[in-house]
Amino acid sequence: MDKRKVIYYSDELHDEFSVAQIEPRHIGSDYVYVHTSLFKRFTRFFWYRVVATPIAFLYCKCVFGHRIKGARKLKKAKGRGFFMYGNHTQDIADAFIPSLVTFPTSVYVIVHPNNVSMPLLGRITPSLGALPIPDNVIAYRSFKEAITTRINEGHCVTVYPEAHIWPYYTGIRPFADTSFDYPAKLGAPVFAFTNTYRKRRFFRHPRIVTCIDGPFCPDMEKTVRKRRRELRDKVYDAMCRRAKLSDHVQIKYIRREKEQ
């Protein structure tokens, strides 16, 4: 459990407060995003369905008393691949919650290279759906192709547009519309999921209630720039509205005054 009570920040866009310190590996043109062999398909099923899904449910339910509100809205995208965008406030739970929200639809998550750089777990996270952000243009092509492939297969691709982890933060930090380029170009529906924190008596951890909003569909008659901006604004507005439902502050965030 994060024992910090107060965190001072200077930059909402770039400050990172995760306690994990990992040296990221290089994600270059040799990184394989989509495996087609039977063995890799089996490892995906084994690690994702047999191992990770039960652990995710037990961890989120036992530690945070996790609940989901509005999951039925996802049925509006039934049979189609879709994107989910959420607030980034947990190291472990944020890796688990998307798969619980979309179950039984499989989830792939766009992640920092740190997530595939750990000595042992880093070899497993790709089977769990991790899509690490590449380091160069050539690798970026494979990265985009992987996203397109997963959407065309009818899966969910999850994005944390805030990028940096702020543990237990109850607000929504501003984020750019860059990551909305994917659904804007593919014409895929978008959902927002907002993790809110609620008071619980007799428990050290607050309850996490995940609220779902959407679908938000891109207007394909507009330019890509306008599509992604509109999607970003709709998701951001929905997340800000839901964030107001939090009634517990585990860690207080205070802006550090700039030196004159």
Image (tube, rainbow, N blue to C red):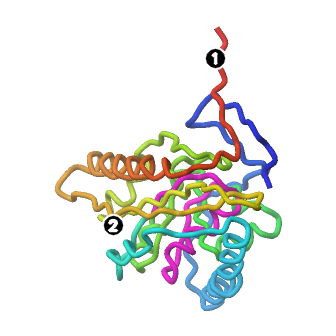
Tag nearer the camera, 1 or 2? 1
Picture quarter containing residue 114? bottom right
Q: Residue at x 30, y 48 (%)?
A: 230
Q: Is residue 194 left or right of residue 213?
A: right
Picture layout, residue 251 above or below residue 255: below
Task: Assess disc 2: are there few (<14), some (14-19) or many (≥20) residues with their C-alpha within 10 Å of its C-alpha.
Answer: many
Identity of the residue drawn at 67% across and 74% down: 56
Q: Position of residue 208 (x, y in %)?
A: 61, 61
Position above or below: 198 against 99 = above
Choose between 101 and 22: the one closer to the eye. 101
Query: Where does residue 185 sit, x and y in percent of width and height?
Result: 32, 59
| Cα distance between the residues tagged 1 and 2 | 42 Å
> Can you tell which mark lies on residue 188?
2
Along the line of sight, which residue is nearer the eye, 253 or 244? 244
| Amino acid type of the residue that numbered disc 2 sits on in the rendered structure | Ala
Span of residues in magenta: 84-112
Comparing 135 with 179, the one in front is 179
Residue at the image position 74 percent from the left and 36 percent from the top:
6
Q: Position of residue 95 (x, y in %)?
A: 64, 65
State the residue position of label 1. 258
Are discs 1 and 2 less than 8 Å apart at CB?
A: no
Q: Residue furthest front?
A: 201
Left or right: 53, with 4 as reference point: left
Q: Quadrant of residue 195?
A: bottom right
Q: Specify whether residue 91 is painted magenta.
A: yes
